[in-house]
Amino acid sequence: MSTATRRAWHLGRRAPQVADDAATAADGGPEVAAPSRPRVRWRVVGVGGSVAALLVLAAGIASVVSVPYYAITPGSGVPVSSLVTVPKGLARAHLGAVMLTDVELVPLRALSYLYYELDSSAQVVPSSELFGTASSAQYQAQGVVDMADARQAATVVALRTLGYPTRAVPSGVTVYQPEPDSAASHGLAVGDVITAVDGATVRTLAGLVAALGAHAPGATVDVAVRTSAGGASHHVRLRLGEIRVASSGSSTPEVCAPVGTDTALPPLEVHGAPAPCLGIVGALQAYTTVGLPFPVSISADGIQGPSAGLAFTLGLIQKLDRNDLTAGLKIAATGTISVTGQVGDVGGVAQKTIAVREAGAALFFVPPSEYQAALAHAGPTLKVLAVSSIGQAISDLEQLGGRLVPPSARH
């Protein structure tokens, strides 16, 4: 499964309600003792009694046996205004409101699997579809990275829409997933931001490719790294692998193999020579925000993933603008937001639609590819609109009577 698909499953979710004992131990977390066998005494009365006793025993076993599946269930609608903090005197109160919505991820056991398969409001997905090659700890870290990116992009886009000179400047490359057994897996973690390779400054994905391309596979390089939270930089020394073309049927077209291994896979050559690699699956562009006119804080409220980006953007605009962009309506939104204001795909839209419908929203913005899934669960009172950019969302709201103060009249 592609990284883009896995990122879509970082869908505005809260942490799983119950930890999977086996997965927790395997990921280096605290080991949880297996539940002791229940001491059950029963009297066998003919065949019927035996069957009943066996059914009770089977149900008991099914309630503790984990299965590699999760249920995605409807979460709740959360007003964005309660999560956004701006300086006193700048916040505006309006009749309308913007809500974000999340889903719950429930790790399943054999008995609960049957329950959620029969629940029309839930979606059961394999663990591998959610995690890919990531451990559960890495998956949680990816959700934190996604949420931080969503808050940053929402702040930049909202303030720029309101006429402030706020920009996002490329400042490195974020590690989203170290490829197993690659150089990255021996020194880089999810959320690390690469800022230089052997002294060559790295600000963009293209810059990282160029910096690595100056070395041959097998070379040891010095990689400058900062944490995604903006911590102090540190350096790691890594031995570059070489890119090899994966076998047919593989979920990824290329692998980053240590030099001298996987000889059955042909190398990918650039200008007649094998291409070097670190082994980062789905590297992300990191940005630094400049031109911030005043402090803006957006709380995640325990939610992980990137899908609140559009809702954060609309909610921050609504909080700062004198006019009511929502025209007095309660609206909800899901979708990622880029620093250029483009809206991207998310997952769990069917369950999110149920959540915002039950929260009393009148309008639900979704990415275009999710429109049909949302429409199928909207019911008779919830209007669903597909939007591909923040500009389109604002235009739709203006057609419903919403208004923004023109940037020229603001400052």
Image (cartoon, rainbow, N blue to C red):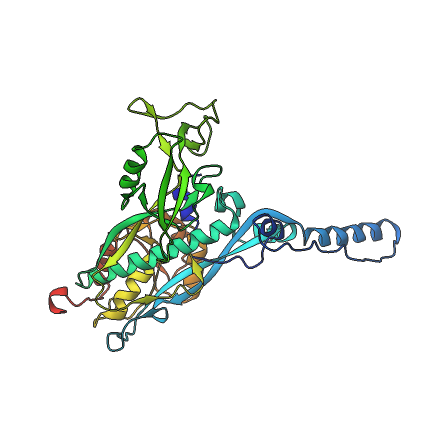
Measured as percent of width and height from the top left, residue 222 is found at 36, 42
Q: Tell which residue pokes out farthest to the left in this image.
A: 408
Q: Is residue 392 left or right of residue 352?
A: left
Q: Quadrant of the N terminus?
A: top left
Callout count: 0
Residue 167, relative to residue 201: is it above or below? below
Measured as percent of width and height from the top left, residue 352 is found at 43, 57
Measured as percent of width and height from the top left, residue 216 is found at 35, 29
Measured as percent of width and height from the top left, residue 156 is found at 25, 59
Q: Is residue 138 visible?
A: yes
Q: Quadrant of the C terminus?
A: bottom left
Q: Tell which residue pokes out farthest to the bottom in this image.
A: 89
Q: Is residue 121 visible?
A: no
Residue 161, relative to residue 87: is it above or below? above
- Tell me which residue sits at (27%, 50%) in the image: 171
Residue 100 falls in image quadrant: bottom left
Which of the pair 110/174 is nearer the observer? Answer: 174
Q: Is residue 50 left or right of residue 336?
A: right
Residue 379 falls in image quadrant: bottom left
Which of the pair 388/29 is nearer the observer? Answer: 29
- Tell me which residue sits at (69%, 55%) in the image: 33
